[in-house]
Amino acid sequence: MQSRRKFLTRSLALGCTAAASPLVTPVTFASAPGDARLVVIVLRGAMDGLDVVRPMGDPDFARHRPTLDATGSHDLNGLFALHPALGQLMPLWRAGELSFAHATSTPYRDKRSHFDGQDILETGGTDVGDDGWLNRAISKLPGTTSETAFAVGRENLMLLSGPAQVSVWSPDSDLDLSPQAQLLLEKVYAQDPLFQQAAARAMELAELTDNPMSPRRAGRAKPLAEFAAGRLKEDTRIAAFSINGWDTHANQHNTLPRALGELSAAILTLKSELGPIWGQTAVLCLTEFGRTVQENGSRGTDHGTGGAAIFAGGALKGRQVLGTWPGMADGDLYEKRDLMPTSDVRSYAAWALHALFPLAKSDLRSLVFPGLDMGENPGLIT
């Protein structure tokens, strides 16, 4: 499989849509038949699932992490508790609109490279080429069309790259337009409400990149979610974007809450903006791998293997921490350092696609995630 580094280099040279780099955060959309909505959020940098969904009931948790603060946790089921930075999501948990999967991972093992890990997460396997699994899923849906959106920036998520046409909109590249150019743009799109609205939104969000000290730039996930929700209320059925900031090698007690705050804002914005459509929506928040069981000397955690996934939406059968917990005793760890994976995170995505859209399990196993053993239905979607 082509590396993400090569993929990005080629894409920049050709000026075409490409996978999202860890420095660029595009939003991509596709229209599909039916009423269900799917949002996939890629958490770039390897989220520490052990700190987000804390196994407080495991006696070895505190032993492995003696200085990482676990106070303020929100109890989920006696064994697991939620990080306080996601406390605003607890009403979703109580309403059955929030779930998690623990000790889960892609097939990626041992080298622990962000680039390679994200490649496998977004393409859906180790030998499937450069097409994203979500693009392959769209190719099997009947009646899909290319949803027109305003594009600001050059790149697309690898998750949605491939032959199936999708629309791309990104606020993260500079939109350096003179007043005359802005006036011309307004005139060009004056008779097209869709383009006019999208262009105005793009110019507004360009302020986030023009002024990095702007206080509005601190909340970058919220406007992405707002734009996604706006399209999902129309013809769009599938949206994907990424949130950065999950690489917590040092001072995790400071860095992780910021990323969790972005994610919380994105999920709550989707719920608020979608209104009644939220009841037909599933949000999958996936990361390339987990982090080490033991904290390091910088009060952080290093690249690991088993991690966690976060699921939200009114379409969920919520209030679940899915997966088989492997334990954190020394003999239970993968390579004597990481949480042992007991499930394939792709299986949760596959079952979600099967529940939301007219996608056969045979297509999911052979085309979308080639060679995947989907296992038993985890009951993620109602």
Image (cartoon, rainbow, N blue to C red):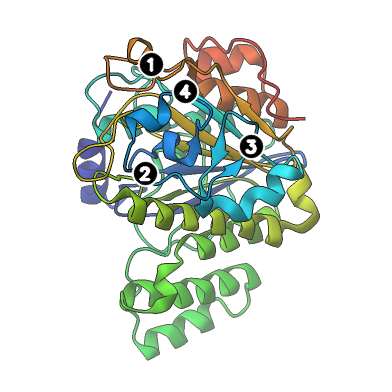
Residue drawn at (36%, 60%) of the image: 153
Q: Amino acid at mark 4?
A: Ala
Distance in Å between CA atoms under marks 4 and 1 = 14 Å
Residue drawn at (52%, 65%) of the image: 223
Q: Amino acid at mark 2?
A: Arg
Circle number at residue 44:
2
Image quadrant in which the C terminus is located:
top right
In front of the other: 80 or 166: 80
Earlier-in-chain disc, 4 versus 2:
2
Image quadrant in which the N terminus is located:
top left
| Left or right placement of residue 304 versus residue 343 in this view | left
Circle number at residue 76:
3
Q: Is residue 52 above or below residue 168?
A: above
Q: Is residue 110 above or below residue 130?
A: above
Circle number at residue 329:
1
Element assignment for label 3: loop
Element assignment for label 1: loop
Distance in Å between CA atoms under marks 4 and 2 = 18 Å
Number of residues whose C-alpha sits closer than 10 Å to that of mark 4, classed few (under 14), some (14–19) or many (20 or more): many
Distance in Å between CA atoms under marks 3 and 1 = 22 Å
Instruction: Confirm or deny contact between disc 4 and disc 2 (CB under 8 A).
Output: no
Number of residues whose C-alpha sits closer than 10 Å to that of mark 2, classed few (under 14), some (14–19) or many (20 or more): many
Percent position of residue 230, x then y: 65, 61
Circle number at residue 103:
4
Distance in Å between CA atoms under marks 1 and 2 = 28 Å
Distance in Å between CA atoms under marks 4 and 3 = 16 Å
